[in-house]
Amino acid sequence: MAASLIDERIHQFYILTIAVVGFSAGPTGSRAASAAALNIGAAKMNQHSNQRGKASAGLALWAVVAVFTLCTLLTPVLPGALADLTFMVPLIVFGAVHGTKRYGWRAVVAFAVITLVVSNIMENLSIITGFPFGHYHYTDGLGAKLFLVPLLIGPAYIAVGYLSWVMGTVLIGPVRRGSRLFNTVAVPAVASFAMVFWDICMDPGMATVQQNWIWEEGGGFFGVPLVNYLGWFLTVYLFFQLFALFLRHRGEATVDVIPLPKSYYYQAIAMYGAVALKYPTRYLADFVSGGSEPVTDAAGHTWWTGDINETAALMSIVTMFFVAVLAALQLAQRRPTLPRTDQPDTPALSAAGQRAA
């Protein structure tokens, strides 16, 4: 690291020396060469500066992943409000920084707005009519509400939704201007499965055990009805599909045409896996403490918290961890860098990329 920094400084000094000597000499040709040398030197310095900035941003994102993973492991011993805070804040920070690096801040804002609007409309609609999730209502456990839905619900959709979206793009391919119809539809579909997998692990504990929301007619999956998961798939598919259409038809990209390293995608995969880690952690804590209590849903069926936590751990392994492992293996087979997804997919660019390779 120190040697490369010394080499960089020597190179910069050499360029500047040529430039100064050229200007001192006086002839037009020498001055032109000196100006060119200065331009090269400036470009080199900017390139090194950008590389250092990107390395710092990458390390910062890995730090967020590490902090979030630690918070996940500590979930069983944290108070409820603090556990919610340590779950949401790292996810939101990660998604904002990670997403901006790939798509630019305007697209990140668009994703957040689309997700908030669609999820809040669908949740309120279901609370009032029973469509698409079924009949349920929120208690006061999650705090203040936007209409009939707690304010915390929207950011949760955004945060885990972004990670699920990245899983879809790694497994299927990018969605960008001029993308094939297949990618434009398939990525939202795969991302929707990745998102619903989280709800399968999360909903029984949040509803039947903690009673943050109540399924008024109960359901066969520890008090949660099947229609809830169908409604989840429809809802998340809608906002994923709208975002895909936004990416496919938006104007000129504002992000530099620079490939992203594999480590960038591994960060999101690790973050998605850390979300899944919450459920085996809770089960192990429950197993060690030996505590399993009966809980009764709104339909009068009695369930045991130990069974709910064990099932959530199992489901996280065969759904969310499976997606994370599959995405990591898919990524490992690719070239060292992947193109940014906001660049046009044209034959000219593809040919240029092949020639460069």
Image: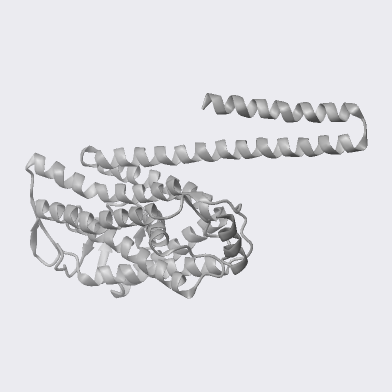
Residue furthest toward the right? Answer: 27
For the point 10% across and 54% down, the residue is 307
For the point 62% across and 29% down, the residue is 8
Residue 331 in the image: state x and y as whole percent.
39, 54
Residue nearest the observer in this picture, 320 or 290: 320
Q: Is residue 84 left or right of residue 314?
A: right
Residue 63's image quarter? top left
Residue nearest the observer in this picture, 322 or 262: 262
> How is the model colour-coded?
one colour
For the point 26% across and 57% down, the residue is 322
Residue 144 in the image: state x and y as whole percent.
36, 53
Residue 301 in the image: state x and y as whole percent.
8, 64
Q: Quadrant of the C terminus?
A: bottom right
Q: Is residue 87 above or below residue 312?
A: above
The image shows a total of numbered marks equal to 0
- Note whether residue 209 is visible: no
For the point 45% across and 37% down, the residue is 59
Q: Is residue 97 left or right of residue 311?
A: right
Q: Is residue 122 above or below residue 295?
A: below
Residue 295 in the image: state x and y as whole percent.
10, 56
- Note whether residue 327 is visible: yes
Residue nearest the observer in this picture, 70 or 213: 70
Q: Is residue 290 left or right of residue 136?
A: left
Q: Is residue 330 above or below residue 347?
A: above
